[in-house]
Amino acid sequence: MATFLYRLGRFAFRRRRYVALVWVALLFLAGFGAASASTPSASSFSMPGTEAQKAFDLLEQRFPGGSADGATARIVFKAPAGKTMNDAANKAEVDKVVAELPKGSKQVASVTDPYQANAVSKDGSTAYISVKYKVNGMALEDSDRKSLEDSGKAAQKAGLTVEIGGDALQAKPETGSGEIIGVVIAGIVLMITFGSLIAAGLPLVTAIIGVGIGVSTITALANVLDLGNTTSTLASMIGLAVGIDYALFIVSRYRAELREGRDREEAIGRAVGTAGSAVVFAGLTVVIALCGLAVVNIPMLTKMGVAAAGTVVIAVLIALTLIPAVLGFTGKRVFGRRTRKKMEAGTVEAATEAKPNMGTRWSSFVLRKPVWVLVAGVIGLGAIAVPAASLEMGLPDDGSQPTSTTQRRAYDTLSDGFGPGFNGPLMIVVDGAKASGGAKAAADRTSDTIKKLPDVAEVMAPALNKEGDTATITVVPKSKPSSKDTEDLVHSIRDAGKDIQSQTKAEVLVTGATAMNIDFSQRMNDALLPYLALVVGLAFLLLMVVFRSILVPLKAALGFLLSVVAALGAVVAVFQWGWLGGLFGVENPGPIMSMMPIFMVGVVFGLAMDYEVFLVTRMREAFVHGERPGQAIVTGFRHGARVVTAAAVIMIAVFSGFIGASDQMIKMIGFALAIAVFFDAFVVRMAIVPAVLALLGSKAWWLPSWLDKILPNVDVEGEGLKAHAAKASDGDDDRELARV
């Protein structure tokens, strides 16, 4: 591996103009494909194998044109104090809105008159119009949303309070701001790390090129592969993160090789052969983590993971080829002016070796107090992880929106007027095609059974389709959609449906947005342990090949799990319990987004293995080349700690930029990823890892002889390069060694 990458790096250096031209051509080709592709339609969301999805599919079949998965909206009206919505003037205003809504958008499938649908509260203070669209919320045009938002302005002028809720107002995710913040902070950190504008700008430029190619390709293939709007957001976030990291690793090693007196071509060859090997295996761990999302069996998540993994592959290829090519153009400018003068005077190597850096001092401290550092790190993360035992998962609804939004105000108004359950009604589908007494009798029996269940506020009359073989029943719970009581009600209805099916042969299915959210959360919860086992297991095997050790990969996996559980504990404390909620803008603590744990595992695992591979491979390299175990740890930190610290700070800054978002879900993702990277990089990799290695000594690198024979030798530490260099020097004794 190291020898092959060494040759690849030297080839890219020598043929730098052609290599750079190829990557620029790929960028323009991908950009042209994205620009010429048709506007991507909304991705279809499905969860094969769940009851809610089965009911949706049945509704599409038995109620054609009903837009079962179409967007919905509720326009909520509240009368002024002392008046009611039944007053003639107020009723007239509502009738105007009902009449105008279908004219404002071609996508409106139906509009329900509140005075005919019993959608006026008992005290008459509140009423709402239900609007159904032909397409889902992500497929609605801005003009459709604008028409919806403007629909109640005349009523507002007449004195009514009008708020709008529902997924029809769900805007397409905005991209760019988080990335821009990350790029700016990354530039500052890189400038401090390298002290050279060229060296700092190179990782940024190449990472942006990689993200540009990846995201443009995703956009070009969005319609063909049915990729959702969030796919490019995830790909750009991950691609930017690993792109900067990998370029940072290569450039840092290249500068170190130059300091040792090697010419530029040899230095880039060795940098790609050693640090490039770490990049390849770090990239593989990220790809494994992202592709592993397929175990959840939700097509949208699988496509997101594979698309993001493709962007990671591009980042790896850029690090191995474009970085060496661009370094070929930089000359001495990869160093700052002061360092260049020292190199010209021949004093840079001595100065570098003589002066211990922060990594050297910290690792020396850990070697002196390994037990104390290990205990402090484990106990500290363990204490932070305690709240994770109380983790409750769900999906956010309008009740989690900031109080400044119309969606949240509509949610609260409906809760006050009708009860919390009106914000998340359940749709019961009764398939009576094979029912012994017919669909109507089965639906009536189902309705009567549900009325007797606890936490039921209202059960609407069954509605039959034209063929009379299927009925729908709307059930309004007493509790809010995200509550445990509503989840229990869904399970109770499903249990009762099984009894009805056994007696009447009519199948009873529960669906609707609330039931879909419950099934989604359950699917994510069930997939978490298999997903963890898959990514950690495969990465363990991969790291065992890289490090030729059993204990080092085991330590890496256990350390990662510790940092993830601690991060989950912090998320629960802030977003579920509300601790320090005001500091992070958490207005309404509640269940943790069901996608969060598995998403955090995938993203953070990839980044954590980046730091692990880069830091520990340098230790392994020093150990293989003859250093004592303790000295190898110091060497690894002297060369790698600064780079890993810079990479982690950049990622924490990027993710922290999302904490300021108004959307609760985005805020939670930003906080979770930032805190997880902090724990893993600075507590696990910088403290627990060297402490464990110090205690293990040479045993850390132990591998049974029989397993050593089975495992392929990928030579990540570059042992093969020594023989290659010796052979080259025998053939060219007069070769100049210090041409920079």
Image: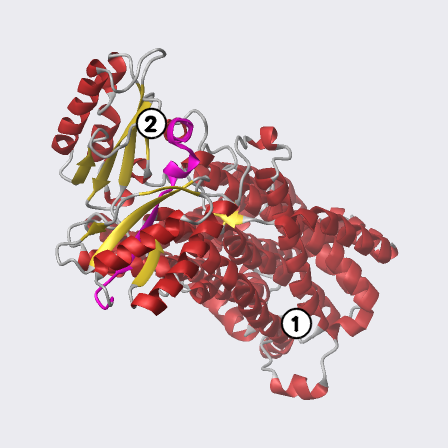
- Residue at image position (39%, 61%) is 298
Query: Helix or strand or loop: what does disc 1 sit on?
Result: helix
Number of marks in the image? 2
Specify whether residue 78 is in view. yes
Q: Name the residue under label 2.
A: 121
Nearest the eye: 385 or 72: 72
The boundaries of the magenta stretch are 411-435
Badge 1 or badge 2: first in the primary sequence: 2
Mark 1 or mark 2, which is nearer to you? 2
In the rendered image, residue 279, in percent from the top left (x then y), is placed at 54, 62
Q: Is residue 365 above or below residue 720?
A: above
Amino acid carrying label 1: it is: Phe
CA gap between label 1 and label 2 equals 68 Å
Q: Does the magenta stretch include residue 413?
A: yes
Q: What residue is disc 1 on?
A: 547
Tell me which residue sits at (36%, 38%) in the image.
174
| Quarter of image, res 635 | bottom right
Crowd rating for badge 2 (residues with CA inside 10 Å; few <14, some 14–19, many 20+): some
Q: Position of residue 309 (x, y in %)?
A: 43, 61
Task: Verify whether residue 305 appears in magenta.
Answer: no
Against 3, residue 493 (above or below) is above
Query: Can residue 739 be seen from the camera position used here?
Result: no
- Left or right for 637, reference 172: right
Q: How crowded is mark 1: few (under 14 residues within 10 Å), some or many (20 or more)?
A: many
Tell me the tag on residue 22. none
Q: Which of 276 and 337 is in front in this view?
A: 276
Residue type marked 2 = Ser
Q: Front-most of 399 and 216?
A: 399
